[in-house]
Image: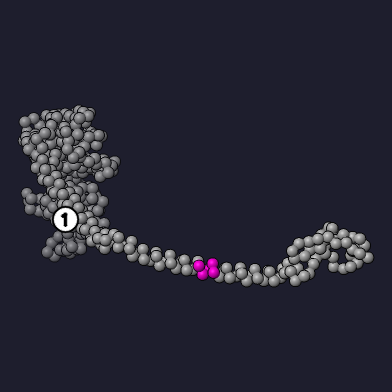
Amino acid sequence: MALTTSPETPLPVGEVSRLIGGWIDRLGAVWVEGQITQLSRRPGAGVVFLTLRDPSYDISVSVTCYRQVFDAIADVVGEGARVLVHAKPEWYAPRGQLSLRAAEIRPVGVGELLARLEQLKKTLAAEGLFAPERKKPLPFLPQLVGLVCGRASAAERDVLENARHRWPAVRFEVRNVPVQGVHAVAQVVQAVKELDELEEVDVIVVARGGGSVEDLLPFSDEQLVRAVAACRTPVVSAIGHEPDTPLLDYVADLRASTPTDAAKKVVPDVGEEYERVRQLRDRARRCVRAHVEREERGLAHALARPCMEDPHRMVDERADQVASLLDRARRTLRHHLDRADSEVAHTHARVVALSPAATLRRGYAVLQKADGHVVRDPAEVTADEALRARVAEGEFTVRVDT
């Protein structure tokens, strides 16, 4: 409703700002298209600030949104991108400033396409299709290389010529398929599966030259990504487009920046390998020569020792020691025998001195009864009893006379 004012009854600025805010609040949420010219995402802040500009009218408006709203498209949207914003207009009365509170932001054109690819990428990554531990190593020298590429394309020529230049004996199993358009995905998937089923194929290369984002869409198709992930044969992605990375690059076992780079990574260079063999052979010769020379020096040092120059010298030195020890042993044994002989003589003399035979030689006799009992008391014998008398030179019989 129109306001009635006059020079005599003007409205205060604050009242005008309040009324404008009320009118804007009644607008409700609207869809707005524009270009992002300024973007502010402070670390830890829950709100993102950006400026949306209309190049046609050179008009800009401030936009705020919660971080989670912007994070949904943060990977594909930046300054300069065109976006669609679903927002509610807001009027800040103290400053008289119009802004938009965004509830949803969508990329426009290529940005929208990239947003869908980013969402697919996150889904496949969450399933583990891009995990490094799934990557299979490439064979050192493949005997047969499978190649999926466009017919008579520069990518096919680059791979074949560079690979054969590096290793002339390498063989290829080529599958020519459309690499863009509606039939590209199905035929590329079929070619990859056919090559994977061939036992003699050691590695598969999927090659294409550069192109726009739309041209490279077949190599980000979910069906192709899952087919490559299921391959038992190592797969090399050789999509020659550096700024944008198709999803095939993430699931492949090896990513090559160009088809030429793929040829260099798939087969070794015969000249480089020959040079490496020559270097290893020279190194082996040096190691063997150094080992032999070291052993020769050790042998010469051992032969220069006195014991090796005059082997009998040690025997002669030991012979004197053996003779000295033998003489010492003889003297010691003789000394022990002499001392033992002396001890035996003294013992024999003592035994002889204490022997009853010595007493008998002095004229004494020993009387024994018939049972051998020695007579010590006259009461022990009876009349006419026969006794045996032992003297120094023998014995004889005596009879008791009462």
Q: Is residue 306 above or below residue 61?
A: below
Q: Residue at x 17, y 60 (%)?
A: 96
Judging by the rendered image, the residue that carries numbered circle 1 is 39
| Residue type, label 1 | Leu
- Secondary structure mostly taken by the magenta-highlighted segment of the chain: helix
Q: Residue at x 39, y 65 (%)?
A: 323
**Which span of residues is magenta-colored?**
334-338
Q: Nearer the viewer, residue 386 or 180?
A: 386
Would you say residue 145 is visible in this rendering?
yes
Q: Residue 321's x, y, as percent?
A: 38, 66
Q: Residue 293's x, y, as percent?
A: 18, 55
Q: Residue 267's x, y, as percent?
A: 14, 39
Q: Residue 286's x, y, as percent?
A: 16, 52
Q: Residue at x 91, y 60 (%)?
A: 384
Is 369 displayed left or right of 348 in the figure?
A: right
Q: Residue at x 14, y 60 (%)?
A: 5
> How many numbered markers are drawn?
1
Q: Is residue 195 above or below residue 323?
A: above
* Disc 1 secondary structure class: strand
Would you say residue 373 is visible in this rendering?
no
Magenta stretch encompasses residue 329: no
Is 164 displayed left or right of 130 in the figure?
A: left
Displayed quadrant of residue 231: top left
Q: Nearer the viewer, residue 63 or 93?
A: 63
Q: Nearer the viewer, residue 238 or 117?
A: 238
